[in-house]
Structure formats: structure tokens, C-alpha cells
């Protein structure tokens, strides 16, 4: 085993030549002896080289050496670093143990930089708990004060910087941005250490991207990579910068480069759990855009296994696969668990899209309003654009096609200016549908052609398939095919779960799904997607749809009589022209059918009057009534379809 050249290694560490320092000092781990300072230098050099196991091993040895010599402050500094490393590896118990040890060592000591770093780590942990942002801000003020008292520039700047980012997360944008931008001066002029410089760069990129200020995030990402090159850190901080760089590439349309960058990040970040998870999330988003659904799912699952939320990627994947019910459930759960404002801002654009696909226009409208408020609060033009896009989609769903055209045109114009080609192409599809529905077929075709060109250049295969389906007219002409739609839904499913428990609910839902799917297939129907706790199916024949609905209610009634229980289901039926898009259906008539379904009572089949008029003899009806359907100017006449035996 070669003897370590300690003096050469320490000199390399002092000039930030991390690779050389690691190479020279690594043999210290194979010896029993070793002074604390070279071991601490080895720990930092190993960290920059992505060798976290060696970082922890060297830090533990340095801690023991400092403790043995009675250097409590130095030992506490190393213990705080160990607490952070274990936290990054998702080992909270070990992390807390090292924090407790550091606090005990500093208990009788005057304020030092080590205390500042400990308080800063406490602030970071506090910021991730419910209602903890104000506590994090208070601790960050203490960190800045400790830095000023001790003359430690790193601690002072970190404390002020953290006050800014925690203030932004709490909704105080103006104050927070002023603090963060102020701390960039010592960063850009090289007044603080590389470790703190890297932290601040990463945080600036993260906050900018969270506010959907991708232009600023891209600028800071480029600046960070220049700094990394100057430091000789090819992958970033170490490798962490690749994640944000991949995101910027994806948004700018360089998908193959984005995929390569994200993949390299996953190779370099094996010991950094949370960052590894972020790398897999970004890789999954690229593959989702490319239409590689199985590969995207694998990436999202890896991110989840590493402790990250796979949202919104996993929900968008389920939506792309046509399982709207699963997408809706996932997104609703994610929003319920997310109370920080920037976290919700990240989820809401996808939540709007999924809600509309599930026929929940009111929910989509509420999400759009919330996103608009967050856009104002965080002074984010792009968040406001996505809110306008949501409002446009709601307008289209409600049949307000003229309003939808105006809103979608604004979205397209602004996204073009931001240089976001994939978002622009999808917005053009929205605009094309609104223009066509409003009678401007030629202008709609122009938008579809522009969207197609962007999708082809990007390689967005799923979007190209969906576009081809949109452009293909059905047998009734440009508006699409006429189909009979049937919406089903279990009434009060939330209360039912509470009454019978999760396990029994899972069994009941599985039986319900099998029963309805068998009956839909038996009556020549096509299952389009799950919608919450029910289905959307289409039929070529009005009579097939009505017969299927009657069979469903009779089957549920028999099961209730023979077994003692079955869920209460409501059903809505309406026939009209639709557009078929990549296995899904869209259009004003789809939303009208959903409204009719939601207006039905438990165990009731409700059919639009126009559909009843097309039914052949052999069905019995209840008394017609009018319902108010959101987005429809006039009341809609509906008729209950009887399903008792012998009818």
C-alpha cells in the first residue's frame, strides 16, 4: 500500500484540486494513524469527487482525532458535516445523532462558525416541516448574526441567503429575492469558499425554476457551469448541476442532450439519494415527452424508491396511457400532501390538465385561479401564462369557444417569446381545437401544421399520434364521429371507503370494475378510460349503450339482493359528435355527457332527451326533467331510463 503524500495532498486541497488531493490523501483511510486536518481535507476532496463513503469514513476519523485532542469546536464542525451527509443519504436517525453530538460539544463554547453551520442545518430541516418556514427564517437570522460576530464570511452569507430563499417559499417574494440577489455579489467576486458558492448557485437555480422563471434559471445554470469548469468540476457540484442543466435543455427542446445529461447525472450521483432521485425524475420527464412510457415509468419508480415524490410525472404518464382515474387520484393525493406554495405551483398546471380530462371543469377552474394567484404572488410570468392556459381549456370545455380562442392565442404568443417549443406546440393544439369549434377551420389547420412541425423536430411521438387522430375527420365530417357516450360513477365512494375499510374497498372496486367491463364489452362498447370511480365508454349504437346501462343497474341490484351489498352507481348517456385523440375523446358533447352523468341520482340512468328520441322501442322511462349544466346556456332536458326487471 503506497504511503500517502500528506503535504502534497494538503497543498492540492488548498488550491481546490480535488482530484489530486483525493488521490494523494486516500491512502490515509488504509492506515490507523492520521492527523485530523489532513483527514478533513480528504473528506472534502472525496465529496467533490462524489465519493461519499470515503467522505464519511474520513470525517469520522477526523472527528475522533479532534475529540481525542480536546478540540471540541473542530469536532463539532465535522459532526455537523456528518449529519448533513447522512441526511443526504436518507439516514435521518444517524443525521440526528450527529447533530445532537455537535450541539453537546458546542454547549459551553462561545459563538463560532461551527455553531453557525449547525444552526443553518437546523434551519434547513425546519423548512421542510409543516409550518416550519418561519422557524427556518429565525434560525437563518441567527446564522447571519453568528457569521458577523465571528468574522466568518461563509456563515454570514449563508445565513442571509437562506433568509431570502425561505422568505420566498413563505410567499414574501420581494424581500426574499432582494436578499438572495444581494448574496450573489460575494459569490460572483469569489469572496466565499467553493462549497458555499456551489450551494448558493444551486439554490438560485432551484428558486428560479420553482417560480417557473426558466429564463433566469437558465442564466444561473449557465453561470454555474462556467464556475464548475473553472473549478475543474466537470459534472457540477458534483454532478448535481447536471440535473438543472438537463431540465433547461428539455425545456428548450434539446431532448437528446437533456436525456444524455440526466443519464450522466444518475451515474455520478449514486451516493446522493435526494439528488439521484431528482436526476431520475428529470430523465423520466424527457422520456415521457419522447413517448417512451415504460422507460419513463421505470425512472419515476426509481425516483420514488429514493424518497422523492414522482409527481407530476407519474400522473401525467397515467394520463398519457389513458387511465384518467389513476392520474386524477395520484394528483389529488399529491396536492393534498403539498402545502408549500412553490410545491403547489409545480403541480397545478398538470392538475388542471388531468381535471379537465376527468370532466371536472369546476376543479380545473379552481386550480387555474389558484395558479394565477401564485403567479402574482411570485411575480412569475410563466405561472400566469399557465393559469391563462387553464382558463382557456375550461372555456373550451364549457363551449365558450370564442373566449377559448382569445385565451389560447395569448398563451401561444407568449410561449413563443419564451422559447419553449414543446409547451408552444401543445398550446397550438389547444388553439386549433378552439378555432375549429368556433368555425375558423382553416386557421385551426394552420395551428395544427405548426404544432406538427415542432413535434416532429422534437421527436414527440405520442403527441404526433394524437395530432394525427385529431386531424382525421370522422364519418360525420370535420367535427368527428358521432358516438353514444356512457359515464358511470360510484356515488359517495369516499364515505364508502370509510365505512368498509381500505381492504374491503379494494376488493369491492375490483369486482365492480370486472362487472362493468364485462357488460360494456358484451354490449359492443369501448372503454375509453377510468374516470375517478367509474368509466367512460362509447358505443356505436344508442340502443347498445342504453341496454348496457340497464344491464349494469340490474346486475348491481341482483348482487345487492343475493349478497346483501353492492355499490350505488349513477349513469349518464348522451350521443353526439366527438373528436378521437390517441385513445381519448374530447369535445363539447363529451362534457355535456359528463354533466348528465353527474346530475343522475344513485342507481339512476339519466339520458339526454335527444338521445331518448333516437332509441328504439323496448325501454321504459321516468318523468323528464331539466338540469342546469355548467357552460350550457339553456337547461338540458334529461329523462330517467327505468332498469327494473321486465321493463
Image (tube, helix red, strand yellow):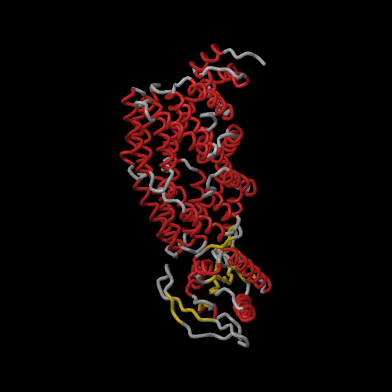
Q: Quadrant of residue 142?
A: top left
Residue 563: x, y in percent?
63, 78
The tally of labels here is: 0
Q: Nearer the viewer, residue 269 or 443?
A: 269
Q: Nearer the viewer, residue 399 or 226?
A: 226
Q: Is residue 569 above or below residue 223?
A: below
Q: Is residue 6 above or below residue 293?
A: above
Q: Nearer the viewer, residue 384 or 104?
A: 104
Q: Is residue 617 left or right of residue 183?
A: right
Residue 376: x, y in percent?
34, 48
> Where does the C terminus fall, quadrant-wise?
bottom right
Q: Is residue 435 left or right of residue 461?
A: left
Outermost residue, bottom direction?
646
Residue 365: x, y in percent?
41, 59
Is residue 253 visible to us here? no
Residue 612: x, y in percent?
54, 80
> Where does the N terminus fall, quadrant-wise?
top right
Q: Quadrant of residue 403?
A: bottom left
Is residue 108 visible to us here? yes
Q: Is residue 425 left or right of residue 526?
A: left
Q: Residue at x 55, y 37 (%)?
A: 89
Q: Is residue 647 above or below residue 50?
A: below
Q: Is residue 88 left or right of residue 168?
A: right
Amino acid at each position: 500500500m503506497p504511503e500517502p503524500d500528506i503535504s502534497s495532498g494538503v497543498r492540492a486541497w488548498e488550491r481546490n484540486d480535488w482530484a489530486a488531493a483525493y488521490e494523494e490523501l486516500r491512502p490515509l483511510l488504509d492506515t490507523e494513524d492520521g492527523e485530523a486536518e489532513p483527514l478533513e481535507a480528504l473528506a472534502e476532496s472525496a465529496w467533490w469527487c462524489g465519493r461519499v463513503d470515503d467522505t464519511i469514513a474520513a470525517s469520522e476519523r477526523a472527528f475522533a482525532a479532534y475529540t481525542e485532542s480536546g478540540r471540541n469546536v473542530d469536532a463539532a464542525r465535522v459532526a455537523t458535516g456528518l449529519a448533513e451527509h447522512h441526511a443526504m443519504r436518507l439516514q435521518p436517525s444517524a443525521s440526528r445523532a450527529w447533530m445532537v453530538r455537535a450541539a453537546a460539544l458546542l454547549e459551553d463554547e462561545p459563538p463560532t462558525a461551527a455553531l453557525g453551520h449547525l444552526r443553518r442545518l437546523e434551519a434547513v430541516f425546519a423548512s421542510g416541516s409543516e409550518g416550519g418556514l418561519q422557524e427556518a427564517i429565525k434560525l437563518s437570522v441567527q446564522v447571519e448574526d453568528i457569521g458577523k460576530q465571528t468574522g466568518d464570511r461563509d456563515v454570514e452569507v449563508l445565513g442571509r441567503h437562506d433568509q431570502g430563499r425561505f422568505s420566498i417559499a413563505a410567499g414574501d417574494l420581494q424581500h426574499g429575492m432582494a436578499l438572495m440577489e444581494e448574496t450573489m455579489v460575494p459569490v460572483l467576486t469569489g469572496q466565499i469558499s467553493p462549497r458555499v458558492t456551489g450551494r448558493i448557485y444551486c439554490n438560485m437555480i432551484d428558486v428560479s425554476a420553482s417560480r417557473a422563471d426558466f429564463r433566469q434559471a437558465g442564466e444561473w445554470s449557465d453561470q454555474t457551469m462556467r464556475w464548475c469548469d473553472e473549478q475543474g468540476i466537470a459534472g457540477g457540484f458534483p454532478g448535481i448541476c447536471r440535473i438543472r442543466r438537463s431540465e433547461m435543455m428539455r425545456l428548450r427542446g434539446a431532448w437528446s442532450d437533456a436525456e444524455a445529461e440526466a443519464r450522466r447525472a444518475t451515474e455520478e450521483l449514486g451516493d446522493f439519494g435526494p439528488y439521484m432521485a431528482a436526476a431520475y425524475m428529470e430523465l423520466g420527464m424527457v422520456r415521457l415527452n419522447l413517448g417512451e412510457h415504460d422507460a419513463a415509468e421505470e425512472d419515476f419508480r426509481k425516483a420514488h424508491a429514493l424518497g422523492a415524490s414522482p409527481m407530476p410525472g407519474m400522473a401525467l404518464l397515467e394520463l398519457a396511457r389513458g387511465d384518467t382515474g389513476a392520474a386524477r387520484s395520484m394528483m389529488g393525493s399529491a396536492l393534498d400532501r403539498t402545502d408549500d406554495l412553490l410545491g403547489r405551483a409545480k403541480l397545478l398546471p398538470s392538475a388542471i390538465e388531468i381535471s379537465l380530462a376527468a370532466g371536472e371543469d369546476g376543479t380545473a377552474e379552481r386550480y387555474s385561479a389558484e395558479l394565477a394567484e401564485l403567479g402574482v404572488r411570485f411575480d412569475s410570468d410563466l405561472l400566469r401564462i399557465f393559469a391563462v392556459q387553464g382558463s382557456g381549456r375550461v372555456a373550451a370545455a364549457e363551449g365558450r369557444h370564442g373566449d377559448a380562442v382569445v385565451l389560447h392565442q395569448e398563451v401561444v404568443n407568449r410561449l413563443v417569446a419564451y422559447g419553449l417549443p414543446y409547451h408552444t406546440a401543445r398550446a397550438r393544439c389547444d388553439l386549433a381545437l378552439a378555432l375549429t369549434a368556433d368555425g375558423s377551420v382553416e386557421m385551426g389547420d394552420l395551428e395544427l401544421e405548426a404544432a406538427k412541425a415542432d413535434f416532429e423536430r422534437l421527436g414527440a411521438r405520442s403527441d404526433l399520434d394524437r395530432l394525427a387522430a385529431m386531424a382525421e375527420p370522422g364519418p360525420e365530417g370535420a367535427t368527428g364521429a358521432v358516438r353514444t357516450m356512457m359515464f358511470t360513477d360510484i356515488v359517495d365512494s369516499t364515505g364508502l371507503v370509510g365505512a368498509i375499510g381500505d381492504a374491503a374497498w379494494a376488493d369491492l372496486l375490483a369486482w365492480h370494475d370486472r362487472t362493468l367491463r364485462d357488460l360494456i364489452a358484451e354490449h359492443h362498447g369501448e372503454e375509453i378510460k377510468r374516470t375517478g370511480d367509474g368509466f367512460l365508454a362509447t358505443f356505436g349504437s344508442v340502443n347498445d349503450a342504453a341496454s348496457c346501462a340497464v344491464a349494469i343497474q340490474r346486475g348491481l341490484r341482483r348482487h345487492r339482493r343475493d349478497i346483501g351489498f353492492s355499490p350505488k352507481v349513477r349513469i349518464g348517456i348522451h350521443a353526439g359528435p366527438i373528436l378521437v385523440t390517441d385513445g381519448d375523446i374530447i369535445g363539447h358533447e363529451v362534457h355535456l355527457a359528463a354533466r348528465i352523468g353527474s346530475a343522475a341520482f344513485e342507481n339512476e340512468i339519466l339520458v339526454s332527451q335527444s338521445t331518448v328520441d333516437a332509441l328504439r322501442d323496448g325501454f321504459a322511462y321516468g318523468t323528464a326533467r331539466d338540469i342546469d349544466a355548467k357552460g350550457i346556456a339553456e337547461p338540458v332536458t334529461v329523462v330517467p331510463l327505468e332498469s327494473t326487471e321486465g321493463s
